Image (spheres, rainbow, N blue to C red):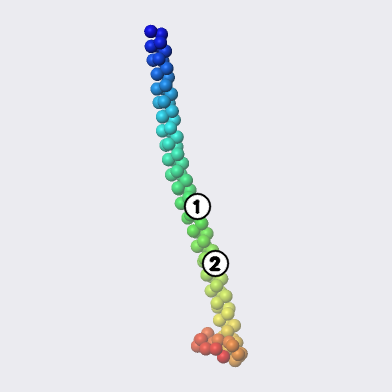
Amino acid sequence: MRTHIAVAALAALTLGAAACTQAEQDEAGANAEVAGERAGDVAAEAGEVIEAGAMKTAQAVEEGAGKLADELEENQAEAAAQGRDGAVDPATDKRQ
């Protein structure tokens, strides 16, 4: 009889430990899922921040390139008006 009680107690402990372990595994799985979703959200936000920075950089380069093009065009127009060899008249796109 004692053996049966001991076996029953051992079985109950084993089942309890297994249930506890499964509950812990379920909780860990749920936590991992939440962490994965959060990581995805953070990655998406980081992507937006990087893209916004790249956009601002491209706009600054475009603005700077536009200013440089205007300055070079003025210089070429002046050089063409003076008849300097190699100058390109921006109005006609013809070389002197």
Location of the N terminus (image quadrant): top left
**Residue 67 in picture, x, y percent from top left:** 56, 74
Q: Residue at x 40, y 22 (%)?
A: 15
- Please tell me which residue lies in front, 46 or 59: 46
Expressed as whole percent of the image width and height from the top left, the position of residue 22 reads 41, 29
Residue 85 on image: x %, y %? 60, 90
Position of residue 30 relative to residue 50, above or below, is above
Q: Work out whether 96 lies above or below 14.
A: below
Residue at figure coordinates x 45%, y 47% from the top left: 40
Q: Residue at x 52, y 66 (%)?
A: 59
Work out which residue is located at the far top of the displayed protein and give it. 1
Quadrant in the rendering for residue 19:
top left
Q: Residue furthest front?
A: 3
For the residues labelled 2 and 1, the Cα–Cα distance comes to: 21 Å
Q: Quadrant of the C terminus?
A: bottom right
Task: Say whether residue 71 is left or right of residue 19.
Answer: right
Q: Which element type, helix, strand or loop, lies under badge 1?
A: helix
The three-letter code of the residue at mark 2 reads: Ala
Instruction: Please give the residue where the numbered disc 2 appears in the rendered image.
Output: 60
Q: Which mark is residue 18?
A: none
Name the residue nearer the viewer: 41 or 74: 41
Q: Secondary structure at mark 2?
A: helix
Residue topped by disc 1: 46
Residue 93: x %, y % from top left: 51, 86
